[in-house]
Amino acid sequence: MLSFLWNDLILNPMVNGLLWLYDILGNNFVLALTVFTVIVRVLTLPLNIRQQKSMLKTQEMQPQIKAIQEKYRDNPQKMQEEFQRIGYNPTETLSGCLPLIIQMPILIGLYRAIFFLLGSTPQALFELTERLYSSINLTALLPLDNHFLWMNLSQPDPFYVLPILVFATMFLQQKLLTPAPQAQQKSNTKKGQQPDPMGQMNQTMLYTMPIMFGFLSVQFSSGLSIYWVLANIIGIFQGYYVRRAMAPHREASEARREANEQKGLVSDNSESSEKKETSKPASLKSANGADARQKSSEKRRTSKRKRKARR
């Protein structure tokens, strides 16, 4: 069952799709890989945009989420009601992993497809013939051109240019999807709280993911690295669009946060002024009492002096 799902639904369609694109695009494998990348990104575009919007919205709501969790830690039902009131759904955090889960079979399948298509061993050619559809005329396409610039597309980049591009493009893509931590850190600092753990995790992932994939690209075939660079470039434009679309929501949330902070300052000032007003009568009473005691003691001393003078 798993073999059927992998071969007939993922690997074989990739192999035949790349061969078909290679045929109609003038036997240019990089061009075929570019069109294949665009098709994959277009098919997953609605899911990616929804996930990115949800992630940005959740990250911007972290101060409110943390405050609700601390306030209603002993009342889960009230906590869920408050989450619904601010528009936060905890299950959306798990759905954010879905695009990455979908990408993993594509990456693995593309790695195997490049091995079959551009492999120079008889075993790779034999396995390729077993995966072809009847509409593909392999004889007219052989040998496949597996060179692009200085690279052999079936081998890693010898000059490490592609791993650097993978790191740079993935970093830019992650940067567009990671909100600036200043607003959250300022909010937590004013409230005397520790920095937000999720914000720290996002900042860590901003660097660890590009470094990890850049390191793996040193061992990937150049064709797979080219696919990842192209996918990241498309993701950069997609992330830019999402940030532009989320700008009004972000400005509104910032305005609400500033308004809440101003309300908090006004309430603190009113409480302090009330305390001063209530403390004023007490101080006046104490001062009047001290004056009265001082006058009475002076009268006693005056009367004593008069009695001595009579004697």
Image (spheres, rainbow, N blue to C red):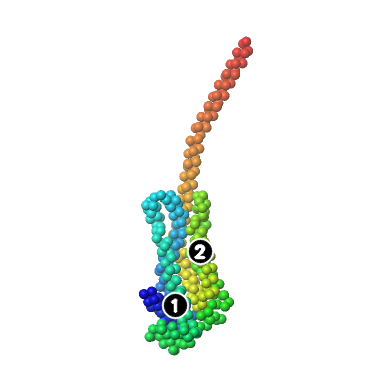
What is the total number of numbered labels drawn onto the structure image?
2
Crowdedness of circle 1 by 10 Å Cα count: few (<14), some, many (20+)?
some
87 or 162: nearer the viewer:
162
Asked which secondary structure carries label 2, the reply is: helix
User: Which numbered disc, 2 or 1, marks the residue closer to the eye?
Assistant: 2
Which residue is painted at 47% across and 70% down in the image?
A: 235
- Which residue, given by chain and number where applicable, does mark 2 sit on? 205
Q: At label 1, which amino acid type do we have? A: Phe
Q: Quadrant of residue 9?
A: bottom left
Q: Where residue 181 sits in the image (x, y, percent)?
A: 51, 58
Gap between marks 2 and 1, in whole Å?
28 Å
Q: Where residue 152 sits in the image (x, y, percent)?
A: 53, 81
- Which residue, given by chain and number where applicable, does mark 1 sit on? 36
Point out the image quarter for the C terminus: top right
Which residue is painted at 46% across and 56% down in the image?
A: 62
Point out the image quarter for the N terminus: bottom left
